[in-house]
Image (cartoon, helix red, strand yellow):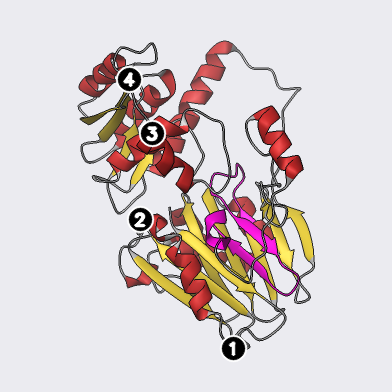
Amino acid sequence: MCGIAGIFSPQNQSGKYSIVKNMLNHLEHRGPDGEGVWRNSENTCWLGHKRLSIIDLTEGGFQPIVSNCGRYSLTFNGEIYNYIELRKELEQQGCLFRSESDTEVLLQSFCANGIVETLQRSIGMFAGALWDNEEHILYLFRDRAGKKPLYYTNQGDALWFASEINAFKNNKDVSLSLDLEAINHYLSLGYVPSPSTVYQEVLEVGAGSVIKVASDLSETFMAFWEFKIERDRRISRFDAVEEIEALLQESVSLRLRSDVPVGVFLSGGIDSGLITAIAAMQSSRPLKTFSAIFPGSSFDESESARQVAERYGTEHHELIIPSRLDDLIIRVGKSYGEPIADPSIIPTFAIAEEASKYIKVVLNGEGSD
């Protein structure tokens, strides 16, 4: 989980370094391992990055990153799980690499294969901003399921983007006002449907999509993926089980690609139990698992989690969720840029805080950032 932020304007924005730096300060918790700010020669595009180093822990993984040809600059949050396979293909095409990072693979692929084809072939969770120095176009993109967040606001004289809405706040150049219709949706549904947010001026980049921002700040929406249902396909129960198991095995294997240890949020349910079992059998090092415990509650599945942890020999950690949640709820509220009614965010936030003391990466049965 890295943090990205930036500004794009038709006018020279030579004094924006301190503003981008301030936006990155609001994203400090997302990337404590490094910080970078890049600007183009005309000072019209500024890209910022807060790094959480997962792949290639050296300086080769620092961002923003500029392509060998000089055309593209990229700030990126997430991971491209099939970057090894993509890199081999690019090397066969003659591409030369300066690092071992998945971000450079993505950037090189943009140069060789274009924006849409690259994203269609990239397996992962990601959000990013790509600057095209030849066409003077900014691209904002987000993964198929929208696992990694990306927000933007077009203020008329400049377009701002960031991993979190909080990065836009307390900035005199960004106007924010509550969207009453969005609040109505929240009270009815428990969340604000994408691409809207609780603020009229802020939108969310849609899952599986690219937003092309021209030099006059006009926006063009492009979808690079949509969910398709194979309605005519028939498969037996046995074959379905076999196929799902194979897909799970492959999915977990790809997500274990990391230069740092990977853990699992183990609730005791079926989803996290399966992920733990598959990850433990594939991992070359002891797996760390983490569980939130609700003593005396019907939600407490700690005994099931312990049984799974014992069976697969994980290094198991338990966190007792207190009966009084006053302080925890305040910290959760400050971390979200807009209201959300999902009660599971409270134990998830607490166990994430605990897990961050030991590891940087976890697998779980949920996809939200």
Tag 2: amino acid: Ile
Residue 255, quarter of the rendered image: top left
Tag 4: amino acid: Phe
Horizontal and vertical percent position of residue 151:
62, 56
Q: CA distance from mark 1 to mark 4?
A: 55 Å
Is residue 52 highlighted in magenta?
no
Question: Which mark's residue is nearer the viewer, 2 or 4?
Answer: 4
Q: CA distance from mark 2 to mark 3?
A: 33 Å
Tag 3: amino acid: Asp
Say which label, 2 or 3, has the lower sequence index: 2
Identify the residue at image location x=72%, y=67%: 155
Say which label, 2 or 1, has the lower sequence index: 1
Question: Which mark's residue is nearer the viewer, 3 or 4?
Answer: 3
What residue range appears in magenta?
A: 141-169
Q: Where does label 1 land, which residue? A: 41
Q: Where does label 3 land, which residue? A: 326
Packing grade of label 1 (10 A; few <14, some 14-19, many >=20) is: few
Say which label, 3 or 4, has the lower sequence index: 4
Identify the residue at image location x=27%, y=14%: 303
Residue 180, quarter of the rendered image: top right
Q: Where does label 4 land, which residue? A: 294
Q: CA distance from mark 3 to mark 4?
A: 16 Å
Q: Where does label 2 land, which residue? A: 54
Say which label, 1 or 3, has the lower sequence index: 1
Q: CA distance from mark 1 to mark 3?
A: 49 Å
Residue 173 versus residue 306: which sits nearer the camera? 173
